[in-house]
Image (tube, grey):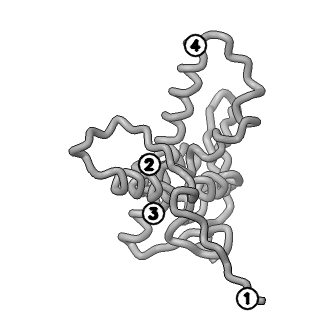
Amino acid sequence: MHHEALRPAEDTYGWTVLATTVPPEGGTDTEILQAYQEQHSTVEPGFRWSKNPAAISPLWLEKPERIAALAMLTVVGLLVYAVLQRQVRLSLREHEQHIPGNKGLTATPTAAVVFALFTPVMLVHGTVDHIPSLQVHGVQDYHLLSCDAVGIAPAWYQGVATGQNSLPRTPPP
């Protein structure tokens, strides 16, 4: 007895729905689909969380205006996230530097890693004898690299009492 694998007909492989505002002269269907699929490293990760029904469904937004406002805030937040990540990565690559990441030093941190690096940094504002005092604690050199990359002025960590009662800066491990 001889068995032979049957190959399904090409028309049974499935379909991809392509709905776009790109005009036909903007590219072929294949080119548009490839451009969409290549977004996995840029735009798509930012929106991936929103595709989970649990991400949005707990919110009770009864009015279309509130839904639109939430969508706008989400897009602006993702834009800030993407710009921060891009600028830090470009700066690190340009200066051949690295900062701590999830698995050691990296020149391509995600914005989440950059934000997480700042969790131990504190700005302490106090008043002694009616004299205000600002002290920044926990700032490391890699924090300064990240701030420089996105254009944050060094004034935030050069308060009235720069260096006083602050942990000594150490280079990244």
Q: Which element is circle 2 on?
A: helix
Which residue bears the numbered disc 4?
Answer: 64
Q: Which element is circle 1 on?
A: loop
Q: Say whether disc 1 or disc 4 marks the residue closer to the N-terminus.
A: 1
Return the mark for residue 2.
1
Q: Position of residue 161 (x, y in %)?
A: 58, 48
Which sits in the foreground, 121 or 40?
A: 40
Is residue 56 positioned above or below 11 on the image? Answer: above
Alpha carbon separation for disc pair 3 and 4 = 37 Å
Q: Residues within 10 Å of mark 4 (few under 14, many from 20)?
A: few
Q: Residues within 10 Å of mark 1 (few under 14, many from 20)?
A: few
Is residue 61 positioned above or below 97 on the image? Answer: above
Which sits in the foreground, 48 or 142?
A: 48
Q: Say whether disc 2 or disc 1 marks the residue closer to the N-terminus.
A: 1
- Quadrant of image for the N terminus: bottom right
Q: Is residue 113 left or right of residue 52?
A: left
Q: Position of residue 131 (x, y in %)?
A: 63, 32
Which residue bears the numbered disc 3?
Answer: 89
Quadrant for residue 139, please give it: bottom right
